[in-house]
Image (tube, rainbow, N blue to C red):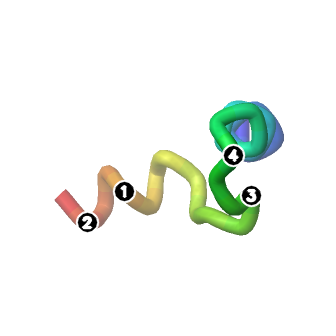
Amino acid sequence: MEELVRGIRVRKGLKPDIPALDYYYDKL
């Protein structure tokens, strides 16, 4: 799952070293 997130962020031109979606859900 994390690899998929990194791939998407890289395509969008964002830094790939962003935490997985689980990290964002925990912040909510």
- 26 relative to 28 in the view: left or right: right
Badge 2 crowding class, 10 Å Cα cut-off, few under 14, some 14 to 19, many 20 or more, is: few
Q: Specify the amino acid type for callout 2.
A: Lys
Q: Circle 2 sits in a helix, a strand or a loop, which is it?
A: helix
Mark found first going from the N terminus, 3 or 2: 3
Residue 27 vs 20, above or below: the answer is below
Tell me how far mark 4 sits from mark 2, CA to CA. 23 Å
Tell me how far mark 4 sits from mark 3, CA to CA. 9 Å
Q: Which residue is mark 3?
A: 16
Mark found first going from the N terminus, 4 or 1: 4
Does the residue at mark 2 contact the one at mark 1 (Cβ under 8 Å)? yes
Residue 14 vs 19, above or below: the answer is above
Tell me how far mark 3 sits from mark 2, CA to CA. 19 Å
Badge 4 crowding class, 10 Å Cα cut-off, few under 14, some 14 to 19, many 20 or more, is: few
Mark found first going from the N terminus, 4 or 2: 4
Q: Looking at the image, is mark 4 or mark 3 nearer the viewer?
A: 4
- 25 relative to 21 in the view: left or right: left
Residue at horizontal 49 percent and vertical 46 percent from the top = 21
Does the residue at mark 3 contact the one at mark 2 (Cβ under 8 Å)? no
Q: Which residue is mark 1?
A: 24
Furthest residue toward left: 28
Q: Residue 8 placed where, x, y %?
A: 69, 32
Q: Specify the amino acid type for callout 3.
A: Pro
Q: Residue 13 placed where, x, y %?
A: 69, 46
Q: Specify the amino acid type for callout 4.
A: Gly
